[in-house]
Amino acid sequence: MTTSHNLQDMRLVLTTCPDQASAHQMARYLLEQGLVACISLVPTCSYYCWQGELRQEQEVQMVLKTSPEQLHGLLQSLTHNHSYEVPELVVLEASAAGSYGAWLLNAVNSGHGPFNQEMD
């Protein structure tokens, strides 16, 4: 049996937050604005150079899933609302297969957030 997997063009945006509380707050805001369909939060340890100094920080990696049409608004919102002076904004082109892809694009391109109930 062959299954058709219609691929939908999407974007993955990576950013980090300094802690769980700020990541949850950002996630809720972006979902309420309808800029993303889904966000995954992953605790991570980041190593980087900042102002000539090697740093190691515990952060939360956010994997934001959105449509190409919402990408500009998402990046603008992250730039203006992020707590970091220079927030990570990495954009990856991706495809979503089958009914997940259809759900994702409908969630962000319908003009309203992907949920109608309160988040805990």
Image (spheres, rainbow, N blue to C red):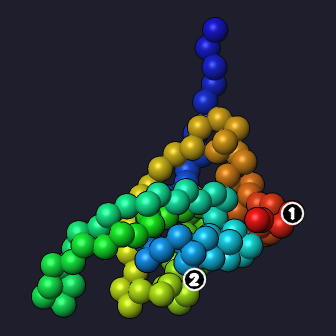
Where does the image place residue 103, in percent across and percent down from the top left? 72, 48
Tag 2 secondary structure: helix
Name the residue: 31% across, 73% down: 57
Query: Residue type at mark 1?
Result: Asn
Give the number of the disc on residue 7: none
Q: Which residue is mark 2?
A: 77
Task: Quote the CA–CA distance across marks 1 and 2.
Answer: 21 Å
In the image: residue 36, left or right of residue 50: right
Q: Which residue is mark 1?
A: 116
| 50 sits to left or right of 32 | left
Q: Nearer the viewer, residue 18 or 77?
A: 18
Looking at the image, residue 119 lies above or below residue 82: above
Which residue is found at the position 64% from the left and 45% from the top? 101
* 105, above or below 112, in the image: above
Place of residue 40 in the rendered image (x, y in percent of width and height, measured from the top left)? 55, 56
Residue 98 position by quadrant: top right
Quadrant of image for the C terminus: bottom right
